[in-house]
Image: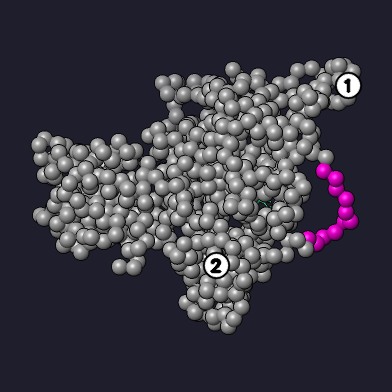
Amino acid sequence: MDGRNDGKNSKDEQLEAFRVDDKGEKLTTNQGLKVSEDEFSLKAGVRGPTLLEDFHFREKVTHFDHERIPERVVHARGFGVHGEFQLYKNMQKYTRAKFLQDTSKKTPVFVRFSTVNGARGSADTVRDARGFATKFYTEEGNYDLVGNNIPVFFIQDAIKFPDLVHAFKPEPDNDIPQASTAHDTFWDFVANNQESAHMIMWIMSDRAIPRSFRMMEGFGVHTFRLVNEQGQAHFVKFHWKPALGTHSFVWDEAHKLTGIDPDYHRNDLWGAIEKGFYPVFELGVQILAEEDEFSLGFDILDATKLWPEEDIPVMIIGKMTLNRNVDNFFAETEQVAFHLGNVVPGIDFTNDPLLQGRLFSYLDTQLLRLGGPNFHEIPINRPVVPFHNNQREGFHRQTINLGKVSYHRNSLAGDTPAPASVEEGGYATYQEKVEGVKIRARSESFADHFSQATLFWNSMSPPEKMHIIEAFRFELGKVKSESVKQQVVDMFTNVSLELATAFAVNVGVNPPIGGGSTVTKSSPALSQENTTKSEITRKVAVILTEGFNGPEVKYVLDSLMNAGIVPEIISENIGTVQGTNGVEVKAEHTFLTSKSVLFDAVYMIRGSDKNIKFNKDAAYFIDEAFSHYKPIGATGEGIEWLKVNNLEGKPGVISETDMTVFVNELIEAIAAHRFWQRKLV
Ligand code: HDE
């Protein structure tokens, strides 16, 4: 196929038509002319001036000069992958969307994960919300679920979005700081726009430093509508639940990773898919009958509110498996264009004023970013079904529309393309009755900014609470204005007196003299303590040197790999390391090329007594892993080494001599991920 709109129903098959492999080919210009010389421009004499006539030089350099497109104004840094979605449960009762009715069908998807604040080249592991945008290539056209890993948002009305973004981006006079909210303008915005309280609690929590894109939840945030064949509607909130559970870094680790591996999250996702560890997310819905719209004690149109899962359970209805990396980052990840307005019959909107504004913004932004109105023809954006309408021309048009007629209504083409009735699959907007006076105001029902912020605080475990306090201390510790800091203390006293008191003095302002919240409700589903724990795909640093106990180490490494764990060996040199009994392993790292923050756990086998530098580096490595609460295992001479370094017997430190017991305990510890109780010993 040559890129025409022929309606293939598999995205992979469609993309195949656009792939080009230049390997083994002769070099040509973009006009197909074979090039005989590509190193030297055309000159008048070998030492003479370059000639304007050199069409090959001009084409090559002009193309290069134009290789950048504007980065996304928010969510500039992201990483996309392909996958498929399969439904578990026929949702016909609630929606006429075909991809939510047929459990036998696999719908191709493309997902782009992102940070919000940083520029395209910023680090992955900064404190921030993460974008979680999914494009479903359905048989009824593209459906985009453009969500985040946090279920609420900073503001209630889209008209404030430019202000929010101006406040959190680097300050305009000096463009500092990059990809960080730890500065005056952001916190000034927060204190003067108190609807942000709930979102700020999430941003200060572990949710804003996820361990992996594969280990975070996704949320549609807004209340949407599902509409069935009978035209009956239900309110819905969308959720993605990661099969591996929801896990995070500790701040020091995330912070160091921004320097050690700024590509940490993309490396993690790319690597997992290349190894065949396909990330799985289950799709969940919370459903609310139209007549219960006002039953929750808050306004469901307010995007700063979540629906506690204990009150409205999440019904799991299908799963998405991410199973293919992109062929080309620019063509796919950079050019993918999401839009909240890409819906299919059976999915509809509500009057959430944030949602309504987004319906305008996404299409508008793509026009600038992708240079005109034909970006739907770019391979990654094409639906897998044909599109037919009277839209023509514009920059970069690829479709060659036949015939003279490009208007509706007409007689010359039999009045086609013709609108489809609902029975024929036409989209019909849900007929919500709307009546009101023209007004610029916040609904009274949007006025409570603090109850759910307190709900979140109340739901945290003690370590999670401590992390939130430390995040406030870090962020406000970087704020210069005392007035702003004091305003933030006063604001968060409304969330929790304990919280505001805990960070006020540390950041150099007065603690609250009273106040606090009376909300006592909590929601266990909000705490990551209660998430799924899994050892699968966790990375273990294995530290060994020549002469290690061959059979023992082989047994442990094989057992870890059989459990889906990824051990990587660190030794004195990269290459083969000899153990006893003829066992050999391959070291991929030295202490120069790897740091403990790149791993979830450490397995210490032996420190060379000869090499003092190696032992010193190992001590630093393990000490850092210990301070990040990570599991540490040791066998053989490693046990002796633990004793010397005073680590034996501490929580999460495993040093068994029986190898079967050792392996089981280590795997269990790896799944547990963190040993917070170390703080207490
Ligand atoms: Fe976005 N947002 N947003 N946003 N958003 C964009 O669209 C906007 C909001 C989200 O991987 C932009 O293509 C407004 C909430 C994701 O390509 C832009 C408002 C949520 C992505 C835009 C919001 C999101 C974007 C920038 C306030 C979670 C990345 C580039 C009303 C539910 C998509 C682009 C990708 C991207 C506007 C608020 C999620 C400018 C006006 C709430 C995941 O159109």
Q: Position of residue 401 (x, y in %)?
A: 74, 21
Residue at 36%, 44% (x, y): give it.
535
Placement of the C terminus among the 4 image quadrants: bottom left
User: How packed is label 2: few (under 14 Cα within 10 Å), some, or many (20 or more)?
Assistant: many
Residue labelled with disc 2: 183
**Vertical position of residue 633 compared to residue 559: above or below:** below
435 left or right, relative to 375: right
Residue 469 visible (yes or no): yes
Q: Position of residue 538 (x, y in %)?
A: 36, 45
Residue at 39%, 50% (x, y): give it.
261
Q: Nearer the viewer, residue 581 or 369?
A: 581
Label 1 secondary element: loop
Cα separation, mark 1 vs mark 2, equals 59 Å
Residue 410 is marked as: 1
Q: Name which of mark 1 and mark 2 comes first in the sequence.
A: 2
Magenta span dominant secondary structure: loop
Extent of the magenta region:
432-443
Quadrant of the rendered image containing residue 32: top right
Looking at the rendered structure, the kind of residue marked 1 is Asn
Q: Nearer the viewer, residue 659 or 120?
A: 659
Quadrant of the rendered image containing residue 274: top left
Residue 190 visible (yes or no): no
Q: Is residue 433 magenta?
A: yes
Q: Nearer the viewer, residue 427 or 59?
A: 427
Placement of the N terminus among the 4 image quadrants: top right
